[in-house]
């Protein structure tokens, strides 16, 4: 019996060593999976492989290497499951509404009205560009669509009135990012799906922060225009011209109001709001403008189908990438590590925003949502940030990311419209990016901006 104690002790030590060895092997496999997944993605991205294929191929290769017996079946199930959500039906509808508005002459009429009102003031045309971008963002839900529609009208007009063409392109690239923040926002639909938050509440939460970003852009535009002498020439407005322009622009001005009324009026899903937006866009053209014929309308829906398919391919690929992170415990490990960092709340928020801004420089918005939301959402909840407010913070970060090289999609659209090299537009956009970062700081530390309009809903819903 005297030898039982030492034998039990040795057995216990043996079990501990075996358990420790298993944990070390598991940690090694987890690190190998993370290195393979991220490494393949980085290599493919550097080779300029499209983002959807970079995400999908890196996830596929990682699964086949580390889960060889069941990988393909799991991937197929994950792809199908990622697209089986009703909220995703809103994406093609919002895209169709934005295309219909852009081709029906709404944008040109909004620009004409705004030019008559403030175009002759110092920086007036720049203010017009931002203001009209805000209105158009509330119709299209897309940053690139806003840059293409408003930029094709405003960049030539700004250049003709003495503005530097690079300045004009940078301004429109930054203003287009408002399409991610101001409702309806396709990005908010994706976030609501991942965070299991009410998409319509996210739409409402984005209104005031979108206005804050717009005001920041207007503030810098007016200051820079005053210093450089842009837009200081007075313009003559013919008698009755302003009322006629107002009447012509009213259907477009009413579009954001119609969408917000639908949201506040109790529409239960973003898909229904998107359907109303499409119907409104078509009716406005048929009744008031008549710029779209049957052939053009068919072209709108055809292009909406093409763009939507591109978006959904990215959704499917990004969901595969995110699933590998989650399945192998990488997401949980990252959450645990971040939650135990010895840093105050304000420093953690700055760190999170810095990471999101850096990610926006190298990846598209949808990919960032699928990769970062599962990691950061538990962390910000631990910090006392509501999921609704974090959705707005994330949207503002990604709006800035659309303007930052090397993959800022708004930059490429603005370069194409202005016919300028990327380097020149990137330099011109930098002050606008800094203005947006300043607005981001206000939004991050002032959650009331996201919650104020939500309190007006029945029951005073908050984030």
Image: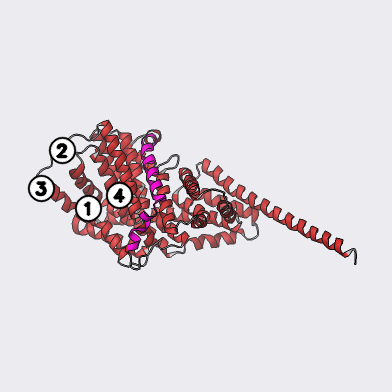
User: In the rendered image, which residue does mark 3 sit on?
Assistant: 240
* Left-right relation of 22 to 337: right
Image coords of residue 54 (percent x, y)? 52, 48
Q: Are marks 4 and 2 in contact (CB under 8 Å)?
A: no
User: In the rendered image, which residue does mark 1 sit on?
Assistant: 291
- Mark 1 neighbour density, 10 Å: few (under 14) some (14–19) many (20 or more): some
- Mark 2 neighbour density, 10 Å: few (under 14) some (14–19) many (20 or more): few
Which stretch appears magenta?
Answer: 426-455
**Could you tell me which residue is drawn at 70 percent across and 55 percent down?**
23
**Quarter of the view holding residue 95:** bottom left
**Could you tell me which residue is drawn at 42 percent across and 65 percent down?**
86
Q: Any mark on residue 134, and which? A: 4
Q: Are marks 3 and 2 in contact (CB under 8 Å)?
A: no
What is the distance, in whole Å, between disc 2 and disc 1 at their CAs?
Answer: 29 Å
Q: Is residue 383 magenta?
A: no
* Front: mark 2 or 1: 2
Pointer 3 or 2: first along the chain: 2
| Numbered disc 3: secondary structure | loop
Please tell me which residue lies in front, 60 or 383.
383
Q: Is residue 441 magenta?
A: yes
Please tell me which residue lies in front, 462 or 166.
462
| Numbered disc 2: secondary structure | loop
Pointer 2 or 1: first along the chain: 2
């Amino acid at each position: 019996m005297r030898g039982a104690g030492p034998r039990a002790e040795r057995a216990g030590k043996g079990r501990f060593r075996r358990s420790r060895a298993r944990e070390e092997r598991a940690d090694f496999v987890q690190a190998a999976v993370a290195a393979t997944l991220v490494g393949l993605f980085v290599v493919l991205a550097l080779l300029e492989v499209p983002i959807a294929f970079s995400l999908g191929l890196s996830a596929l290769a990682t699964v086949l290497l580390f889960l060889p017996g069941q990988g393909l079946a799991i991937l197929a199930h994950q792809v199908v499951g990622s697209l089986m959500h009703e909220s995703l039906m809103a994406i093609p509808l919002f895209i169709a509404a934005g295309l219909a508005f852009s081709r029906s002459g709404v944008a040109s009429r909004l620009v004409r009205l705004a030019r008559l009102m403030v175009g002759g003031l110092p920086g007036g045309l720049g203010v017009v560009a931002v203001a009209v971008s805000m209105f158009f963002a509330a119709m299209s839900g897309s940053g690139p669509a806003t840059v293409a529609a408003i930029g094709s009208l405003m960049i030539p007009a700004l250049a003709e009135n003495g503005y530097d063409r690079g300045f004009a392109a940078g301004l429109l690239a930054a203003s287009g990012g408002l399409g991610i923040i101001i409702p309806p926002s396709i990005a908010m639909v994706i976030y609501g799906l991942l965070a299991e938050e009410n998409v319509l509440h996210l739409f409402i939460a984005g209104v005031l922060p979108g206005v804050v970003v717009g005001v920041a852009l207007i503030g810098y535009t007016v200051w820079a225009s005053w210093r450089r002498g842009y837009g200081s020439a007075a313009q003559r407005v013919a008698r009755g011209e302003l009322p006629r322009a107002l009447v012509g622009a009213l259907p477009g001005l009413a579009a954001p109001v119609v969408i917000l009324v639908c949201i506040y009026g109790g529409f239960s899903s973003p898909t229904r709001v998107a359907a109303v937006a499409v119907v409104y866009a078509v009716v406005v053209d048929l009744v008031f403008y008549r710029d779209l014929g049957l052939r053009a309308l068919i072209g709108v829906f055809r292009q909406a189908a093409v763009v939507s398919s591109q978006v959904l391919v990215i959704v499917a690929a990004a969901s595969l990438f995110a699933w590998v992170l989650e399945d192998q415990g990488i997401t949980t490990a990252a959450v645990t590590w971040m939650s135990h960092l010895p840093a105050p709340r304000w420093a953690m928020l700055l760190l999170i925003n810095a990471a999101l801004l850096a990610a926006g420089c190298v990846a598209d918005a949808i990919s960032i949502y699928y990769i970062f939301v599962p990691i950061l959402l538990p962390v910000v909840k631990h910090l006392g940030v509501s999921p609704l407010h974090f959705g707005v913070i994330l949207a503002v970060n990604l709006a800035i990311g659309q303007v930052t090289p090397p993959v800022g999609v708004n930059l490429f659209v603005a370069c194409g419209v202005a016919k300028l090299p990327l380097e020149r537009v990137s330099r011109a956009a930098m002050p606008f990016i800094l203005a947006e970062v300043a607005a981001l700081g206000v939004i991050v530390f002032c959650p009331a901006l996201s919650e104020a309009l939500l309190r007006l809903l029945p029951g005073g819903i908050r984030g």
